[in-house]
Image (cartoon, rainbow, N blue to C red):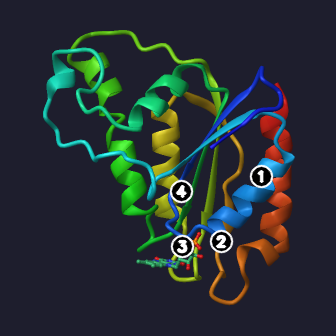
Amino acid sequence: MMKGRNNAMKTLILNGSPRRNGDTVSLLNILKDGLDSEVTQIDAYYADIAPCNDCRACRIHDGCVVDDDMSQIYRLLPDADNIVIASPIYYSEITGRLLEVFSRLQVYYSARFFRGEKIVFKPKKGAVILVGGGDGSGERADETSRCILMHMGCKSYFPTVLSHNTNNIPAAEDKAAVEAVKSLAQWLSES
Ligand SMILES: Cc1cc2nc3c(=O)[nH]c(=O)nc-3n(C[C@H](O)[C@H](O)[C@H](O)COP(=O)(O)O)c2cc1C
């Protein structure tokens, strides 16, 4: 899904929820309402993106030999200004489906480590939005998300937005989370 406003700025959202009108999506909708940016959202559960199967072709050749929707992420990543990872917490992690998508970032590691290439991405702002029923903590999911954002070229980060009581209060009614997402939209819209 693409939404065009301030064409000078590009935001890539990676959504790890399978629920089309769930808690993650409700916060993402608030974020997008406040964003002055061109937005591309990849819905991990509905995108045609295979997991990396460690075929190792990228250790020898540029890019990934698997031809699927990941090509959209490869195309947008170098010049994107903002990356947002949004996911429900599953067993204290981001969802497995989202991790499958991120496994395809291995091409950049291979380029650097095995082929000695210098990968230069535009420095980006990164943000994490997590929702959870209320079990455990969001720490591991946050740590994973920030590690992935760093690999995608993020240099500055907004405090993670966490709505962690969705078993009782839907994220869209979690006042603190909603306010935090609105502030995040403002921060991402500033150049
Ligand atoms: C397989 C599975 C594992 C889950 N694990 C956790 C967990 O570890 N901690 C937690 O707080 N909530 C957990 N939840 C609850 C979801 O994170 C919660 O319902 C969330 O609001 C769903 O977000 P969504 O509507 O955006 O998909 C789990 C849900 C599922 C289906």
N-term-proximal mark, 2 vs 3: 2
Q: Is residue 70 above or below residue 153?
A: below
Residue topped by disc 4? 142
**Callout 2 amino acid:** Asp
Whole-angstrom CA distance, mark 2 to mark 3, is 17 Å
Based on the displayed image, in which of its 4 quarters is residue 114 positioned? Answer: top left
Q: Residue at x 30, y 21 (%)?
A: 63
How crowded is the residue under tag 2: few (<14 C-alpha within 10 Å), some, or many (20+)? many
Q: Which residue is mark 2?
A: 23
Q: Is residue 57 found left or right of 76 in the rendered image? A: left
* Rendered residue at 52%/64% (across/down): 17
User: 40 or 155: which is nearer to us?
Assistant: 40
Q: Nearer the viewer, residue 161 or 76?
A: 76
Is the C terminus in the top left, top right, bottom left or bottom right quadrant?
A: top right
Give the labeled residue for mark 1: 31
Kindly check if marks 2 and 1 are in contact, taking CB atoms under 8 A apart as contact: no
Q: CA distance from mark 2 to mark 1?
A: 13 Å
